[in-house]
Image: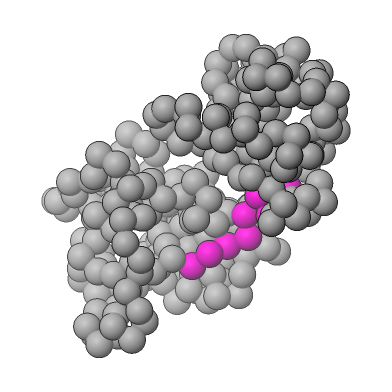
Amino acid sequence: MTGDDSDGSDDPVPDLPDSPAEAASAAPEPSRRDAESDGEPPVHAVGIGPGNTEFLTRRAGRLLREADVVVGFETVVEFVADETDAELITCGYRDEPAALGRFAARVADGARGVAVLMGDPNHSGYQFLGKVEAAVDAPVRVVPGISSVQMAASRARTPLEDSVFETLHVRGDLSSALARLREAVGDRHLIVIPRPYDWMPEDVAADLVDAGADRTREAIVCERLTHPDERITRTDLGTLADGAGGDGPDDTAFSDLSVLVVRA
């Protein structure tokens, strides 16, 4: 593992889109043949799985081993730091532009770049994906990973084809997602990624109950899936709803790495 000793102050800071998730999903990826004809090596946006490296795909592992530079949120990069000898560029929300500018500069110099995202980039990852695409002057290819959604569906035995999935782990208005959950509850299984800490499992349950959902409907909260301290809480919507309220870590019984499943 190679550390990053430079502060990157000479690297340009990219202009990131106001709606990066919309930018990332505006068009499909070009075909591999078209991308190869351009002769420009891609940057890979890699899903690293739920945090346990046993669930890192073989392709993700190979790309990490071959990478020259890896960028991602610090809490994501730390899970795969021992899987690569690449230079690691970590960031938080405040220093994303600067970190992505350093990453883009390395890619422009010919480095093989990998952006890492928790789980599967297609689940809550499009905001960071859109920022990576805006920062680098290279095609970006998504490499899916094992997501906590898949793990939760397995633990709760809820087939994905019989489920409605919503992620609340995004910035901004959640009214459309919440409306879809209210409409589907009781008819289909619900799989929900909460938003720390204003829309945690208790708050989602309260919203469903307020909309008329049966308080006795089975609810399962899966925390830190695949980690040594994984915890599964089996309860019902009413019990969960009674704990709603607040917007901090002390106002919820669950961690920020939670998935809520409401069985049909």
Residues in magenta, as a range: 143-152
Location of the C terminus (image quadrant): top right
Q: Nearer the viewer, residue 191 or 91?
A: 191
Q: In the rendering, at what x and y percent does residue 239 appear?
A: 81, 18
**Vertical position of residue 71 compared to residue 18: above or below:** below
- Kindly indicate the quadrant of the structure image that contains residue 247: top right
Residue occupying the point 22% across, 83% down: 38
Q: In the rendering, at what x and y percent does residue 212 appear?
A: 70, 19
Q: Is residue 226 left or right of residue 113?
A: right
Residue occupying the point 23% across, 45% down: 16
Residue occupying the point 53% across, 50% down: 123
Residue occupying the point 79% across, 23% down: 214
The answer, for residue 118, to whether it is visible in the render is yes
**Vertical position of residue 76 compared to residue 44: above or below:** above
- Kindly indicate the quadrant of the structure image that contains residue 86: bottom left
Callout count: 0
Q: Is residue 245 left or right of residue 81?
A: right
Q: Is residue 123 left or right of residue 133?
A: right
